[in-house]
Amino acid sequence: MVSTKLYTAIYVVLFVSATVQVLVEFAGLSYWLAFGVIMVLSAAKAVLVAAYFQHLRFEPRSLTYLVGIGLAAALALTLAASYSLL
Amino acid sequence: MTDASPERDAAADGGHEVAHDDHGHDFPGTGSIKRWFVTTNHKDVGILYIVTSLFFLVLGGVLAWLMRIQLLAPRGLGEGILAPVAYNQAVSAHGLLMVFWFLSPFAFGFANYVVPLQLGAKDLAFPRLNALSYWLYLFSGILFGVSFFQGGTFSGGWTMYAPLSVPTFTPDVGASTAVLALVLFVASVTVSSVNFLTTMHRMRAEGLTLRNVPLFSWTILLTAWMMLFAFAALLAALLVLSSDRLLGTTYFAMESPAGALLWTHLFWFFGHPEVYIVFFPALGVMAEVFQTFTGRRIVGRKWFILAMVLVAIQSFAVWMHHMFLTSINLQVKTLFMITTIGISLPFDLMVFALIYTMLKGKIRFTTPFLFVFGALLLFIIGGITGVFLGAVVLDYEFRGTYWVVAHFHYVMVGGVTALVGGLYYWFPKMTGRMYDEFLGKLHFAVYFVGFNLLYFPLFVAWETPRRVFDYAPELAPWHQLATVGGFVLGLSFLIMFYNLFKSAFVGDPAPDNPWEYATTAEWAVSSPPPLENFDGTPTYRNGHLEFLDAGEVAPGEDRSDGPTGAAVSDGGVTASATTAVTADAELPTAEAAEVEGPSHASIWPFVLSAGAFLVLLGLSPLQDAAFPEGMVGAAYATTTVAGGVVTLGSLVAMGLEPFHGPVFEEGEAWPFAGIDNGKVGMWIFLASDVVLFGGFLGAYVFTRVAFGWTGWEPIPSDPIPGLVNTYILLTSSFTVVLALVAAEKKHKWGLVTSLGATFVLGIGFLVNKGLEWQHLFHEGLWLSTNVRASTFFLTTGLHAAHVIAGLVIALYLTARAWRGAYLEDSRSVEYFGLYWHFVDIVWLFLFPLFYIL
């Protein structure tokens, strides 16, 4: 499926990008720009873990949709509830 | 309540005395008490669900009687038979018991019994988990019962609105116990949803595509999907509430920003889908019974299904119509008014489909039909009166009045009406005996009169305020009428209990299919069905049900006088039960079945549930994370520890027990074809866990928005310990990957080392987190310091609990790998990895949100 070498490379990327997240915080960017960069990095790491470590990339797409539905429900709750306050 | 059930003994009469003692599992006959503690068979579990849920119906019904007696006249404080707080407890417990412990489990009793038969499966995908669902359900109900004796049960209404639900206002230990009982109930529901979804997607007979699945099974499928996500949100809400009550966090406290509003969001995000979760199975019963007793396939079957799918999706987008009188903004109210009116449209289609089916068919007024027909009328009234509440302006007037009470009783108890019809409908199948038709019709007549006498006056007396026992004196006659109706409705069940109990023993023997024109597969097997449901492998490859048999000549000539193929189509396919004689290569592998035949007995689901019960009972008196002083506190603490030992021990025992699920030939498995049942189950579970963490993170984001996003400082002043933990978790994910690689290469020591490393890294994560928390405690920060601290400790604490659970599994896997396991079959390592990586992913979001942003 995937070689151990690729798994190792992904692990290194994850490790480095976690470090970058903290560096971004100290880089003196504006709050919302830093927020955006950091969340995008988190999402990218999550996608890497799901795609390769959980090998969703190599499974039937239905499993990905299944997780996506859960994610959509969680986001709908979070965003709509927060919006209702504004 | 599980003893001496009529169904059980009759099942024994009906030739159910199977005593399988192969595979080392002692499986006694249905007449034995032991059978009912160890059984994992879906039909047994279904009967257990039905009998237990009827017990809770009686309990909830008696509470309702107490309320109705109190309401005979407007009362002041201390007047009538119930003290004020006792009245509040009766109201709250009645609602909780009826919605959670009666309605859904009653429906899932039928689902357990009927769905595998309708699918052509021999059992559910995970029979032991199915037994576990039942026992968790029973013990959660017992825990709720215990709460009455701990100073008083929860008294804040079934909606558990904050801040009334925190100990400041409901200080009794019993109130905490009731919340914990719900937590246990949700665990049962989650296990059940995963099991049903895996089964229904993966284990349908060949040719039984989703669009051909019978309508009752369709409703259960959609119900299980809604349960999976909605109950995960409820679990988040309940865990936060438990934490507020037991550990002292302050999410819902008066001083927290928008704490009361947070509860309503979390609760109703669950609560509105819950309406359809309890109603859909009733709709399924209506559809089946309408088809059978009109002799007509439902009109617009495809559109009927499509409408249900639409409702199931839309149900997650209407929750704020329960919140029109809160401080949410007008734009969002308007939006949710529109979605609410929108969700009534698919129901119109369903109602018209049912009515038109009656017009085009030839009705036979049997007891099941009378009940479902009554249910349709009641649902129409309940539905129309609900549309009033969906309009923002009208809701300003109706909210908190008996209009709401009357409306949702017409809907919910209307659903019960259909399910009672379902009980009569499937009673012959379950017991092998016919009920008395005259008494059945009499029950319907008394029930229907009682129902309307009880609930209709509540519309007239709508100006009565909800949840209190004082009202304008001129409304008293209506309330007295309702009380009379309440007794008529309740007593009508005596007729049913007498009828069914007696018939279970001495009723006329039921044929395979007592209902002419019933075409679904459960009617193609004997009444009651054999232990493993079908003699051969069911298939629909030729458009109707056939059994592929290994034998030369198929038995069952008597079945051919049942419904015949094309003449009576149920819809998609017909279960015409013409047993096919086939001689092709696709026969069930008889040898394999003998070597690894399905098991039917395990005591561990029962023991595990008892352990979980003890843990939660022991935790119930906690306040601010401390047990009470003295002997009582020590007794509770001991109970917790003992329960923990029992729970862990039975989990290990369950893992080690040789148990074989049902053998099945993969038939229709859309959309999960080619993926192992275990993996599908794990992913479905993880999808619900996404919503659980989504609820926690949603609560955090919501509270932070209410607080002012940028004014909110992260609790840890230093992100470095969090970063170190990120490194540790990422590394442990990598070692799990290496473990799976080693297992696939059959490299034993590589596997043991990688799993062991994962375990050590996990411990490292917890130690690092512990040190960090210790540091924060020394700085004077505690869970109850403020809502910022509460969200930090609870959310990362929930994650840590996931890590701990993972470590228990990792330890178990390491020990077994040491003894040489998983080299032939590495699936356990793979499934553990899926879970562990998920926990890793969650941390990837917790870290920035709680440490750096």
Image (tube, rainbow, N blue to C red):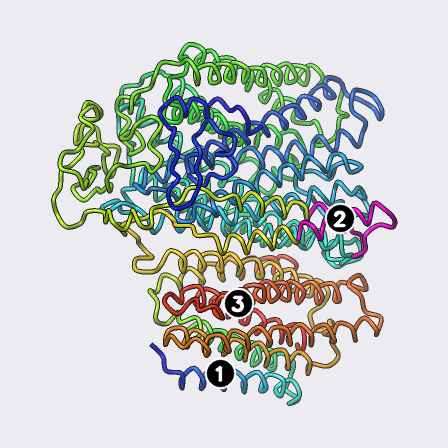
Residue that appears at 58% across and 80% down:
A38
Residue span colored magenta = B615-644
Name which residue type carries label 1.
Tyr
Name which residue type carries label 3.
Ala
Residue B315 visible here: no
Q: Name the residue under label 1.
A: A11
Residue B121 against residue B241 in the figure, above or below: above
Residue extending furthest toward the bottom: A27
Please tell me the numbered disc located at residue B815. 3
Q: How far apart are marks 2 and 1 (CA)?
A: 45 Å
Name which residue type carries label 2.
Pro
Horizontal and vertical percent position of residue B428: 37, 22
Horizontal and vertical percent position of residue B58: 60, 25
Horizontal and vertical percent position of residue A71: 49, 62
Q: Mark 2 points at which residue?
A: B163
Point out the frontmost of discs 2 and 3: 3
